[in-house]
Image: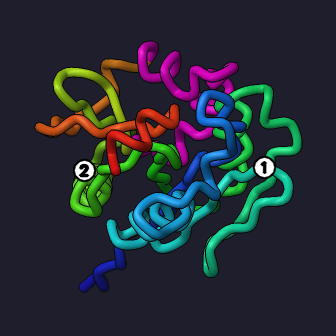
Amino acid sequence: MSVPQPPAPVAGLVLAAGAGRRLGQPKADLLFRGRRLIEAATELLFAGGCLEVVAVLRAGQSPPEGVTAVINADPDRGMGSSLALGLASVQAEACVIVLVDQVGIQPAEIAAAIERYRAGAQIVVARRAARRSHPVLVSRRWYADFSAAAVGDQGGRAFIDGHSDRVQFLDLPDEIADIDTPADLDALG
């Protein structure tokens, strides 16, 4: 008789090293509804079922307690550089990726992506109102290819386009907001 194995742990990865030029400040430390965006994003990943969380930050920023920080020494190379650095530091068999400035992602959405992975999916991408979004889950098998395709601010877009036959979409009804400008922040209140 075989002993059931516990499910493989899944990590969370928050990309948070951007300069926030249109906003006028880096986003990770931006206060939104009483918390830094980096705190909200990492709490989201833990609440959704990630057992460890890695945050890619700019020099001088600090992660919340219990979160592993990876410093992007040259964040102006774009989101792709943060994605590659973050995935290189993740030890888990799969990783759920979110952007620090996308508020509105729910823990149940993180959990649904993890559930799809545990059911056999290798790549899970949220789709909101027929548009790709976050969270994105990638299994370890694809970390190197996902990182290699991440150039500039495109992140994983090229990889997902090139592997659409392997992607399982997680269709979600509601769009989420990005905080890119002071007007976006004001609109979200």
Q: Which residue is drawn at 57% across and 31% down?
A: 146
Dividing the picture into quadrants, the one containing residue 110 is bottom left
The foreground one among 136 and 2 is 136
Q: Which residue is drawn at 19% across and 21% down?
A: 130
* Residue 113 part of the magenta segment: no
- Position of the N terminus by quadrant: bottom left
Spot occupied by residue 74 in the image (x, y as percentages of width and height): 86, 36
User: Magenta span covers which residues?
Assistant: 136-162
Dividing the picture into quadrants, the one containing residue 65 is bottom right
- Three-letter amino acid code of the residue under disc 1: Arg
Other-residue count near label 1 (Cα within 10 Å), few / some / many at <14 / 14–19 / ≥20:
many
- Three-letter amino acid code of the residue under disc 2: Arg
Q: Determine the CA span between mark 1 and mark 2.
A: 32 Å
Dividing the picture into quadrants, the one containing residue 137 is top left
Image mark for residue 169: none
* Residue 144 part of the magenta segment: yes
- Mark 2 sits on what residue? 116
Q: Which residue is drawn at 33% across and 46% down?
A: 188
- Mark 1 sits on what residue? 58
